[in-house]
Amino acid sequence: MPDAKPNTIYLKDYRIPDYLVDNTHLQFELKPKATLVKSQLKIRRNPAAGVGLPPLLLDGVDLELLSIAIDSMPLSSEDYEEIPQGISISVDKPEFHLEIQNRINPEGNTSLEGLYLSNGMYCTQCEAEGFRKITFYPDRPDIMSKFTTTIVASKNYSVLLSNGNEIDRGLCKDESQYVTWEDPFAKPAYLFALVAGDLKCLDDYFTTTSGRKVKLQIFTEEKNIYKCDHALRSLKNAMRWDEEVYGREYDLDTFMVVAVDHFNMGAMENKGLNIFNSACVLASPETATDAGFQRIESIIGHEYFHNWSGNRVTLRDWFQLSLKEGFTVFRDAEFSADLNSRAVKRIEDVSLLRINQFAEDAGPMAHPVRPDSYMEISNFYTLTVYEKGSEVVRMIHTLLGPEGFRKGSDLYFERHDGCAVTCEDFVTAMEDANQVKLVQFRRWYSQAGTPKLNVTDYFDEKRGIYRLTVRQSCPPTPGQKEKHPFHIPLKLGLLDKGGNDLILDGTGSTQCVLEVTESEQSFEFTGFENKPLPSLLRGFSAPVKIDYPYSVEQLLFLMSKDTDTFNRWNASQRLAFMALSDLQQAYRKGGTLQLQPGLIKAYKRVLLNRDLDPALVAEILQLPSEQSIAEESACIDAEAIVVARKFALQTLAEALSGELRARYIALNVRKPYSINAKDIAERKLKNTCLLYLCVTETADSLALAQAQFDIASNMTDKAAALNALINHAGDRQANAAIEQFYRRWKEDAQVVELWLGQQSRSCRRGSLKTVEKLIQHPAFDLKNPNRVRAVIGGFTKGNFSQFHMSDGSGFEFLAEQVIALDKLNPQIAAQQVIPLTRWKRYTGDLAPKMKIALKKIMDSGNLSGDIYEVVSKSLSE
Ligand code: TRP
Ligand code: ZN
């Protein structure tokens, strides 16, 4: 238990701040173990907050307070009081200058919040509540202040950065140097950033539509400068895109990005000075995979887009987190869709949502897109807030259309520029700009859980009327037993016998969006000769589960004929789930396993289809992962899932080996590596075929993998071949590849992480023993989140069969790691514990064994608030 059980904070308790901070001047004297922070704040009573002069509350965590003065008068110990969250200062005037000095220890900071050191470089992470680990401050997003920052440091640091523009630099008396930065835009403390290091930068510029020239800089260690080109190109694309699609220009003279190796998340949108996990910014063809390149493009876009959706318009309080994250994920998803294959991007995003967000929504940590309470806000940087939040914004886009949505976003930015606002303000702007009401729609922000749609239909042959009946329901979630109906945009088309889209109304349109608002509702379409086949929830128009009693034949038909690419893929998924569920059942009954022949035929047809986008072929061919099969099942029978999937994979690999081989060979042409949609798609299909072929474990197929491993000059092909060998080759061959790869790449942090992850995720070689060995490997470091995510996360989230071993050893292992991690980095510990929290859904012995592991964590003593919240909520349900 933490020293004191952390408090629960409620949205309904929100109060506007008593005091405002107009200006913040910070001075840092950087020393690894004892950095001196001087803060000068211009403070004023908030006129909107009432009368009287209540005490001034400042947040502060792990700070050594040296002095406090008001208007240059030092305070005595009677004038202030230390309180659990920081200090409380008595105030006797409505306006004053507050001056505080405190000391912090960046080197000892392993939580990676506040100011810390990463490979000798100083950097900060202040979102959500990290600024209070730098100095005493009203650390809440509705306090917006103009910052200036002076950094004093030894001359060994070639680069001293903070937000905004550099306004002064020089030498100090003692041979150290200083640089002063000024950020002209008022901002909340969570957007503050500081970087000091011996760094080099890749420079460029961008000219905005209105003709302003913006300097662009990507900073990293000298040895990584060659890996910055893709990020820079992506940044320029993002800047152009936001001008074209949202009419938003960048607003400072420079935009800086810094890569750091130790980082809790992907990246951070600090004003004018984005800080990135190096894995999310550095890439070269020899060291990064295509997926890595695409991830960089989307994260660079995401953080850049925050400059408007997050920074210029920020949050009133942390309950509104999805206001910036949901909207910005939607923006980055559309950016990636516009630059690459829209259908494939959608398939990837929906898969993530269905596998991980649906599980969150069905588990003990389920919460609405706008939560109404939390203990530790870091635990709410979730798939629900980000990905479901983005789906909610997408539904508004679907309901209003692109022009209506743009009118709404223009009004939102115009009304709230420079302000700290709420999700409510966003929806209101959308309504006002379009003269519509979205009253019921707001339930998407307040109700948790994944709604379920049951669809049935009826055809009146005599009158040619086709009637769809939709019933909606939503399961209870913690604290929310009863749910009210949602407002659900249900996009659909109706297919005739030939697979053509039928005309749905007088306007001639072949697709429509039904607005489902009641628990049960019917919709009629007229003028048909035969009963049409519905293609429902096209493009995944709402984050719901949908059930319509399709037959195997109908799914096969949709898979080859639907004009909606997303639904073609979706039909293939349904088909695979049906087949896998049959296999699970047969296994449980002790019968012989047989794979649905329709599935094999359908896969063959897709594989032979040269007109389909190869990336889509690859998506269809990949069987749903064990995790996604688990998410489809009400009760998770881990063993049956593993057996069923393995059997299906092997059957398909054998039945299709001729076609797989032919397609592999046709795609395996030598040509220079280039990162464009067509080549990425072809590599993706080629490597999907290779992995399938190797499932048969024939000498032939493994020779193909070995040859590709030996000659590949780009990491996409190299890593795919390594993966095939790790998972399917004999020990000697696999180990040789593993060692050879490490010898070649051991100096490259990003490649080493890929190498660690592949081994931990391997169903064959990633046994618990291997993972325990990897943890002892010199490349592993419990203080480095990327290494933790690769090895521990790779095993627990990416190696379903080994993690769910029936003896519970995987769970015990995770409990021990979480206990050790919690002492170093509570945020990472809380990220890693998630797989244990879904214990209730498992059948047999697994549920009690997972619960024992959770209890072990609970009883280990001295838990962080982060872990306490997640573990106690998982156990208490
Ligand atoms: N705002 C960041 C984003 O856009 C999230 C983030 C980065 C973060 N670092 C963090 C959140 C540390 C909590 C803690 O994705
Ligand atoms: Zn974000």
Image (tube, helix red, strand yellow):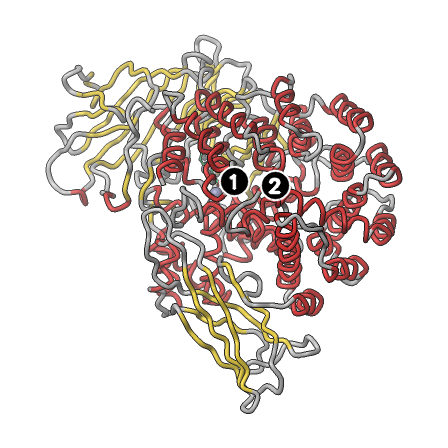
| Residue plotted at (44% across, 63% down) | 407
Quadrant of the image for the N terminus? top left
Quadrant of the image for the C terminus? top left
Q: Residue furthest bottom?
A: 462
> Which secondary structure lies at badge 2?
helix
- N-term mark: 1 or 2: 2
| Residue plotted at (34% across, 61% down) | 484
| Location of residue 140 (image quadrant) | top left
Label 1, label 2: how many angstroms apart (C-alpha)?
Answer: 10 Å
- In this view, the residue in front, 738 or 807, is 807
The amino acid on which the numbered mark 1 sits, given as a three-letter code, is: Gly
Q: Residue furthest top?
A: 174
- Residue 505 visible, this angle: no
Residue 687, image x and y in percent?
77, 44
Q: Residue furthest left?
A: 52
**Is residue 237 left or right of 140 when viewed as pictured?**
right
**Is residue 397 left or right of 289 when viewed as pictured?**
left
Q: Within 10 angstroms of label 1, few (less than 14), some, or many (20 or more) residues?
A: few
**Is residue 575 left or right of 62 when viewed as pictured?**
right
* Disc 2 residue lies near ligand 1 with CB under 8 A: no
Residue 780, image x and y in percent?
61, 21
- In this view, the residue in front, 109 or 595, is 595
| Residue plotted at (80% across, 24% down) | 736
Residue 639 image label: 2
The amino acid on which the numbered mark 2 sits, given as a three-letter code, is: Glu
Residue 844 image label: 1
